[in-house]
Amino acid sequence: MAQEEQVLVVERKVVEEVGMFQGVTVEVARYQAAFFAPGAARFMRRSEAEVDSSHKQLIPYVIMACGGRYLSYVRGKRAGESRLTGLRSIGIGGHINPGDDMPLFNTDFRETYLAAVEREVAEEVDVRAGHSDRIVGLLNDDSNEVGSVHLGVVHLWVLDSEDVSRREQMITQMSFMSRGELEEVRGSMETWSQLCLDNLGRMVEAGKG
């Protein structure tokens, strides 16, 4: 029998102690300190985490930018989350699993998390361009059951070129699009991507800080 998937979570109260929010916040420093504090995060069986709103699953959500254009794709039928099939996205990422070999109780938590994000992205796309990586926002949507158990950690990767190709079959119709082009297809986007698009200017500015 296959071992059940374990996912990285923090208790909801950790977020609440810093300040619960709805939508997007770009004031990420305080939250990062709380999430990356020794013992703040742990792994939980995904089947439990999906129905336990006292915990938030941390989901890296990587936006890739190059020359004012942003990587976008449509989630195909092989998407890991069936509820997102057919929707456009500007975020790459997914659950952080124990396979990422993260030592949760040492001072290198932040670096091991970032390394895990790199590996998660590499499973979905092949990024041959050099890039910088900044955490520029957090996503929270408690308006529905799915959102109530997830917290998005928005990364902005600024690429040297658009040299990115897909690895996962679930990624379809992938291309770099201008902000105006993305606005035209906003209605076909998953909720998190809509929130990111609406706050893109703020997050890009946050990435310059």
Image (cartoon, helix red, strand yellow):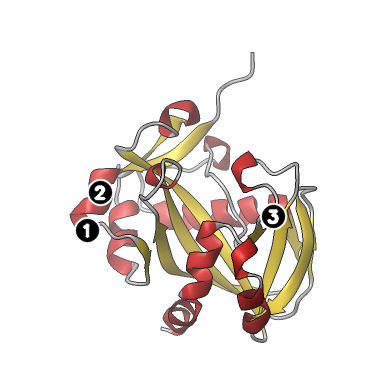
Q: Residues within 10 Å of mark 3 (few under 14, many from 20)?
A: some
Residue underneath mark 2: 14
Alpha carbons under labels 2 and 3: distance apart: 29 Å
Please state which amino acid type lies under the numbered disc 1.
Val
Q: Is residue 66 left or right of residue 136?
A: right
Residue nearest the viewer, comparing 86 with 199: 86
Which mark sits nearer the N-terminus, 1 or 3? 1
Q: Residue furthest left?
A: 17
At 67% from the left edge and 86% from the top edge, which residue is drawn?
A: 67
Residue underneath mark 1: 18
Please state which amino acid type lies under the numbered disc 3.
Ala
What percent of the width, then of the height, locates residue 13? Answer: 23, 45
Cβ atoms under marks 2 and 3 closer than 8 Å: no
Which mark sits nearer the N-terminus, 2 or 3? 2
Cβ atoms under marks 2 and 1 closer than 8 Å: yes
Vertical position of residue 146 compared to residue 178: above or below? above
At 49% from the left edge and 50% from the top edge, which residue is drawn?
A: 59
